Image: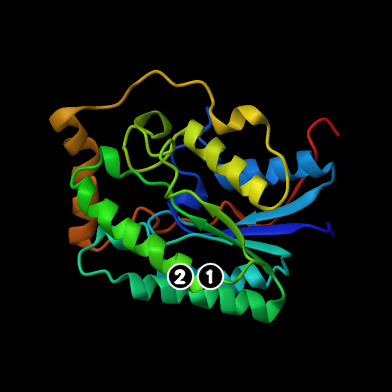
């Protein structure tokens, strides 16, 4: 068994939506960070990813956390709440309680927690000012709860103004593109004391694409509203992409 065993739990942010490979597989920051960890350390690591798109924060905790801890990881990353703050009447305190539960269980099991805040898509979203305000409130509340816990690794993306600009986002404007996922992966590696390739912080810009105007609302906003009305989720019926350990060898080994 490898000395580093890294498991990621969360929603589409951690599943990697927006960073789709030519063969249709979803990659994302967690996959990149796992490979980068192996490359930086020069040693193989074990990696699992239980994240499922569309999940609210408490279903992440209730459905993924114990399953992740049962793998006997050394490190567990957690982010959630992005889907919650898209909904009215969501209270930051309830989301913070979920973060507290993850920290408590990691403490009980002797697992090192990697705390992430999501990237901020507010600048390009409809009603972005509302989302900005809710995200700011959640970010402050989580910071307060984790104050004094210097043993928790932090990869905080919400305050990153560069990451909030359109060139880091996919055509749906809600999920990061390949540039965004690489930047988050670099931040995670920096948080755990590893080194990412310098270019990961800002890959070359992609050609602008994606629907605009009413085409954007038809292709992306409309389906989201339909799922809310029908109480369905983009993650319904999906299984984790790496439910068991996947060994990441250093590149070129």
Instruction: Give how far apart the Cα atoms at labels 1 and 2 are.
Output: 5 Å
**Residue 201 seen in this snapshot:** yes
Name the residue tied to disc 1.
Answer: 147
Q: Nearer the viewer, residue 240 or 85?
A: 85
- Find residue 137 and report its image quarter: bottom left
Looking at the rendered structure, the secondary structure element under dot 1 is loop
Q: Quadrant of the C terminus?
A: top right
Q: Residues within 10 Å of mark 1 (few under 14, many from 20)?
A: few
Name the residue tied to disc 2.
Answer: 144
Name the outermost residue toward the front: 148
Residue 24 in percent (x, y) is at 50, 34
Please say if 142 is above or below 233. below
Residue 219 in percent (x, y) is at 23, 36
Determine whether label 1 and label 2 are within 8 Å by CB: yes
**Image side of residue 75 versus residue 210, left or right:** right
Q: Nearer the viewer, residue 238 or 201?
A: 201
Name the outermost residue toward the top: 207
**Residue 239 seen in this snapshot:** no
Please say if 234 is above or below 252. below
* Residue sitting at x 47%, y 48%: 157
Looking at the rendered structure, the secondary structure element under dot 2 is helix
* Residue sitting at x 62%, y 67%: 68
Q: Nearer the viewer, residue 239 or 224?
A: 224
Residue 113 in percent (x, y) is at 63, 65
* Residue sitting at x 15%, y 29%: 213
Please say if 14 is above or below 105. above
**Image side of residue 161 versus residue 219, left or right:** right
* Residue sitting at x 28%, y 39%: 123
- Find residue 173 and report its image quarter: top left
Residue 141 in percent (x, y) is at 40, 68
């Amino acid at each position: 068994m490898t000395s580093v065993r890294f498991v990621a739990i969360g929603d589409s942010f951690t599943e990697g939506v927006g960073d789709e490979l030519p063969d249709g597989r979803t990659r994302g920051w967690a996959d990149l960070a796992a490979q980068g960890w192996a490359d930086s350390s020069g040693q193989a690591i074990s990696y699992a990813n239980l994240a499922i798109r569309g999940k609210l924060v408490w279903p992440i905790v209730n459905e993924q956390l114990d399953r992740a801890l049962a793998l006997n990881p050394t490190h567990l990353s957690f982010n959630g709440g992005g889907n919650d703050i898209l909904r009215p009447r969501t209270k930051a305190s309830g989301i913070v309680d979920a973060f507290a539960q993850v920290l408590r269980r990691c403490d009980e099991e002797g697992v090192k927690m990697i705390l992430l805040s999501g990237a901020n898509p507010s600048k390009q979203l409809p009603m972005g000012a509302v989302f900005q305000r809710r995200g700011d409130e959640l970010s402050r509340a989580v910071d307060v709860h984790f104050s004094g816990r210097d043993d928790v690794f932090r990869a905080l993306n919400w305050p990153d103004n560069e990451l909030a600009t359109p060139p880091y986002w996919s055509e749906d404007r809600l999920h990061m593109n390949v540039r965004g996922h690489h930047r988050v992966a670099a931040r995670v590696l920096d948080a755990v004391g590893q080194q990412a390739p310098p270019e990961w912080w800002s890959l070359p810009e992609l050609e602008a694409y994606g629907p605009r105007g009413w085409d954007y609302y038809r292709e992306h906003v409309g389906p989201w509203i339909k799922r809310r009305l029908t109480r369905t989720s983009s993650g319904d019926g999906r299984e984790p992409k790496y439910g068991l350990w996947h060994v990441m060898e250093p590149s070129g080994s």
